[in-house]
Image: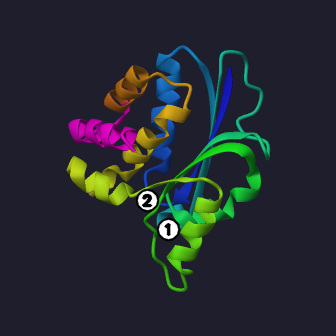
């Protein structure tokens, strides 16, 4: 068993926290894990990507080779488009449908139409995070939405959220549950 998970978005969306939750859940489940982060301009809303690789056997590189992404988790729709060339036809896409608005952002409906054409699961993470009780739980909502496609047991993910998230743990657990219902 091996699973390659690519998480992308922009700085401030909780991408690193989400990858930490996945990594910790893998450890709880007794899997081997390697993780790599790229977050150069993240503090200014720049592009962020995290590779998380899980396996029962040894993992030699933290970076996922092109075409070998199993689960693609995009916290921002335009960032999802930026990484499509790394995916395969079998990659499962879970994408936040809410854009991180910047000047010159393309028509959101065109962006979402392109993602629908790739059979992406589009999630209104902002709406669900407010339903959970705090808008900064969008990352955990998206983990919940991706959970059916991950090789991680639900109880391990819940434990990792409990162990990793420092504030509003109950709200984050609710956010995960709401995302899992998508």
In the image, the segment drawn in magenta is 164-182
Helix or strand or loop: what does disc 1 sit on? loop
Query: What percent of the width, then of the height, locates residue 57?
Result: 71, 15
Query: What percent of the width, then of the height, locates residue 47?
Result: 59, 63
Q: Which mark is residue 57?
A: none
Q: Are marks 1 and 2 in contact (CB under 8 Å)?
A: yes
**Crowd tier of the residue under label 2, counting other residues whose Cα lies within 10 Å: few below 14, some 14–19, many 20 or above:** some
Of 26 and 111, the residue lying toward us: 111
Vertical arrangement, residue 119 with respect to residue 55, above or below: below
Query: What percent of the width, then of the height, locates residue 103?
Result: 50, 85
Q: Residue furthest bottom?
A: 104
Helix or strand or loop: what does disc 2 sit on? loop
Q: What residue did someone put label 2 on?
A: 12
The residue drawn where x is 52% and y is 30% is 23
Q: Which mark is residue 45?
A: 1
Measured in 3D between alpha carbons, the distance from the residue under mark 1 to the one under mark 2, in whole angstroms, is 7 Å
Say whether residue 174 is magenta: yes
Query: What percent of the width, then of the height, locates residue 43?
Result: 48, 64
N-term mark: 1 or 2: 2
The residue drawn where x is 49% and y is 40% is 146
Of 17 and 71, the residue lying toward us: 71
Quadrant (top left/top right/bottom left/bottom right) for the N terminus:
top right
């Amino acid at each position: 068993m091996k699973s390659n998970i690519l998480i992308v978005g922009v700085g401030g969306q909780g991408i690193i926290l989400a990858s930490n939750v996945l990594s910790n859940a893998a450890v709880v489940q007794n899997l081997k894990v390697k993780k790599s982060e790229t977050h150069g301009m993240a503090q200014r809303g720049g592009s962020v990507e995290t590779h998380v690789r899980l396996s029962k056997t040894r993992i030699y590189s933290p970076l996922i080779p092109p075409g070998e992404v199993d689960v693609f988790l995009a916290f921002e729709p335009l960032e999802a488009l930026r990484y499509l060339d790394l995916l395969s036809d079998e990659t499962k896409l879970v994408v936040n449908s809410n854009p991180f608005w910047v000047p010159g952002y393309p028509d959101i409906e065109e962006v979402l139409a392109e993602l629908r054409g790739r059979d992406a699961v589009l999630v209104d993470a902002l709406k669900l995070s407010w339903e959970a009780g705090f808008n900064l739980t969008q990352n955990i909502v998206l983990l919940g939405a991706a959970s059916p496609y991950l090789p991680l047991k639900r109880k391990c993910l819940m434990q990792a959220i409990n162990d990793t998230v420092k504030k509003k743990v109950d709200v984050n657990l609710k956010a995960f549950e709401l995302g899992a219902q998508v």
